[in-house]
């Protein structure tokens, strides 16, 4: 005998369909705003080079760029500064047998000097200023905000970062600290954090000069997919 359809089951079904639709939209790349410079649109790597100036050795397929462990970092041909907003989407593989800094580790270096950490921080404890969204080694994300923003692995994430480089005098001494705001999946996890030095693994130490966007090969392997990036764009800010 067929059981009659109840109002509650209809509502539950509708909510489930709505959830799937919202999730599908969340997984779609966000369109860049007017005036933004597209650094990676999933089609080619014409804006990027390896550290030695050669063509990138990372994997390019299905609209994303995947870290090739051991091949080295890649960076943009262009340099940017002093102030800009950058949007980066990244996907983290499941590395269940790894922990701490060994789980889906990479990084987005602003001007090649200031790393915003990329890491699977879902149920993975590590030091606070080395977790996902940290200005590595300098500024830890707000713990409660980060907890709300973090997704399990194998989902696309977004960074929306507002960056103001430190100001220096003619001798290279910092006269005004830099500022950075980091949004992870739409939630602010660092709000106008201040800094006056580079992070570890920096391309150079030329504070105050324009620099490239660099994506890190942390050389962590899990025997399967690695960290992926897509839809990277940058918009310069007026002084």
Image (tube, rainbow, N blue to C red):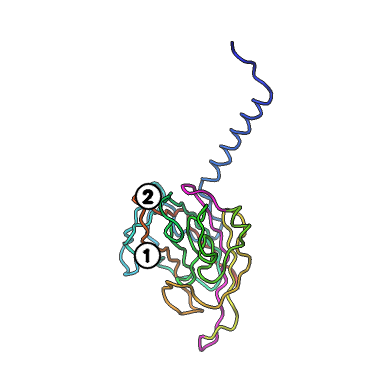
The quarter of the picture where the N terminus appears is: top right
Q: Position of residue 173 (x, y in %)?
A: 53, 86
What number is the disc on residue 73? 1
Q: Which residue is pictured at 55% across the width and 43% down the height?
A: 25
> As displayed, is residue 188 above or below residue 14?
below
Q: Which residue is mark 2?
A: 225
Q: Give the Cα separation between the discs numbered 2 and 1.
A: 17 Å
Residue 48 image-quadrant placement: bottom left
> As displayed, is residue 197 above or below residue 46?
below
Name the foreground residue: 209 vs 140: 140
Q: Which residue is pictured at 52% across the width and 77% down the height?
A: 197
Is residue 133 rendered to the left or right of residue 41?
Answer: right
The quarter of the picture where the C terminus appears is: bottom right
Q: Position of residue 72 (x, y in %)?
A: 34, 64
Dot placed on the residue nearer the N-terminal end, 2 or 1: 1
What number is the disc on residue 179? none
- Residue at far right of view: 7
Q: Is residue 153 magenta?
A: yes
Name the foreground residue: 7 vs 50: 7
Is residue 138 rendered to the left or right of residue 6?
Answer: left
What segment is highlighted magenta in the picture? 150-172
Q: Which residue is pictured at 32% across the width and 62% down the height?
A: 70
> As displayed, is residue 91 above or below residue 115?
above
- Residue at far top of view: 1
Q: Is residue 103 magenta?
A: no
What secondary structure is marked by label 2?
loop
């Amino acid at each position: 005998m067929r059981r009659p359809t109840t109002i509650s089951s209809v509502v539950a079904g509708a909510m489930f369909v709505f959830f799937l639709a919202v999730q599908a939209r969340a997984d779609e790349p966000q369109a860049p705003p007017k005036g933004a410079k597209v650094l990676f649109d999933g089609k080619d790597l014409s804006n990027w080079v390896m550290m030695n100036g050669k063509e990138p050795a990372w994997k390019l397929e299905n609209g994303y760029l995947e870290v090739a462990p051991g091949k080295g970092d890649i960076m943009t041909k262009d340099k940017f500064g002093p102030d800009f907003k950058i949007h980066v989407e990244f996907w983290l593989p499941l590395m269940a047998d790894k922990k701490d800094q060994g789980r889906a580790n990479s990084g987005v270096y602003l001007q090649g000097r200031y790393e915003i950490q990329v890491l699977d921080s879902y149920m993975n404890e590590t030091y606070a200023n080395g977790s996902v969204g940290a200005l590595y080694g300098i500024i830890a994300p707000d713990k409660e905000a980060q907890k709300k923003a973090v997704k399990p692995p194998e989902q696309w994430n977004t960074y929306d970062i507002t960056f103001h480089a430190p100001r220096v005098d003619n001798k290279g001494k910092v006269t005004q600290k830099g500022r950075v705001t980091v949004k992870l999946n739409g939630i602010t996890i660092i709000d106008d954090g201040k800094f006056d030095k580079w992070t570890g693994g920096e391309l150079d130490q030329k504070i105050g000069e324009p620099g490239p966007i660099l994506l890190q090969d942390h050389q962590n392997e899990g025997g399967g997919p690695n960290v992926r990036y897509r839809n990277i764009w940058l918009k310069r800010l007026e002084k």
